[in-house]
Amino acid sequence: MNSSSPFPDNHSTSSDSVDIPPEVYEALISWSVKLNSGIASNEVMQQLRNWRAQNPLHEAAWQKLNKIEQHFDQFPITSKPIVTETFSIADQQKSALTTRRRRLKVLSLAAMIITAITLFANQYAPWHQDAHYATGIGKRETVILADGTQVMLNTNSEIDVNFSLFKREIILRHGEIYIETSKDKESLVGRRSFLVKAEHTALEAIGTKFSVNNQTSNTKLYVTEGVVEIQPNHYAPVRAYANESYAMLEGTSAPIKINNTDQVMNMDPMAWIGGVLVVKQMRLDEFVTELSRYQDITIICDADVAHLKVSGVFQLNQEEPVGHALKAISRTLPVSIDKKNRAVVISKKWH
């Protein structure tokens, strides 16, 4: 993973600026699934070359796909950046703040004045913020908080924002978010702590970029830049560095580091930020579970096809993303897609 910002307004490349029609994306998805199936013949490869040569948009779409897949392939296994200086600065700021408070307590009149100023600041100053944000199924939204921090909410996500004179806090009620923290330059008391609270833990960010996924019985953390201190309920803190991933499971004693070479990493955890779902050798039933987050529809995957593997890049920025994805899968896997009683059923295709 790289440390560049994934937010659309921050930067773009010439290839990213090309407007790719939906029908080209559909064809591209089919090619991706075929190539990653492991059974693509020389004839299929020649057909792909012919398709790319037919239209400049086909080649542009193909280059986009290559960039996405290269990004996924380069997801590092380990990372050990040195952040001692960052923590030292934070500790010095906290120590200086404590010293100032002790001195102010010497004079009762000064304490009264500080109290009055604090109350005023918490209610009216620009660094104060209490807000609630939520997205519906299939929707994403980017918000800029009072301190300049950018937060992107994925599908069906909900957060509460609580900023005061001395702290910055986000409560992740459910769903998934990506955060790029600001340097908090406008704060009167120096750098305020930045906490993200989820069901099983609290996460303190220090000049960082990271995502948090709070689904059902576990919380997952993916750090793309900087460092995040994991503060589990009732257990010792753990520091997560750039390009590291952790899971906080219900009932476990401590955060579990995710090995990026394990099968658990058969999905790019950050691809949703760019509006795509990127998977490699993912079980069909697991893929269906992930895909169903992006559309209000019931998908039933029969047990006799659940083990089949899915690979590809699937677009989320279109109407009925589930239908398009399943259509692409049905072209390359031995499955049938049928609608039954307001549900979509994936079953074995009988010849």
Image (tube, helix red, strand yellow):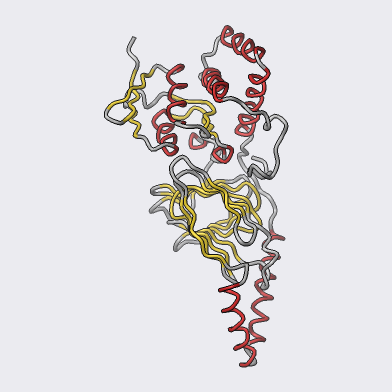
Instruction: Answer with left or right where residue 237 lies relative to residue 2.
Output: left
Count the numbered circles shown. Answer: 0
- In this rendered view, identify the residue nearer to me: 188 or 126: 126
Quadrant (top left/top right/bottom left/bottom right) for the C terminus: top left
In percent of width and height, residue 56 lies at 68, 18
In percent of width and height, residue 225 lies at 65, 49
In percent of width and height, residue 138 lies at 46, 40
The quadrant where residue 104 appears: bottom right
In percent of width and height, residue 95 lies at 66, 74
Q: Residue furthest top?
A: 43
Answer above or below: position of 250 versus 335: below
Answer above or below: position of 259 versus 122: above
Q: Residue at x 53, y 30 (%)?
A: 315
Instruction: Answer with left or right where residue 70 lies relative to residue 199.
Output: right
The quadrant where residue 194 appears: bottom right
Answer above or below: position of 188 versus 265: below
Quadrant (top left/top right/bottom left/bottom right) for the N terminus: top right
Q: Residue furthest left?
A: 341
Q: Residue at x 53, y 26 (%)?
A: 312
- In this rendered view, identify the residue nearer to me: 108 or 42: 108
Instruction: Answer with left or right where residue 59 lies relative to residue 139.
Output: right
Q: Residue at x 70, y 29 (%)?
A: 15
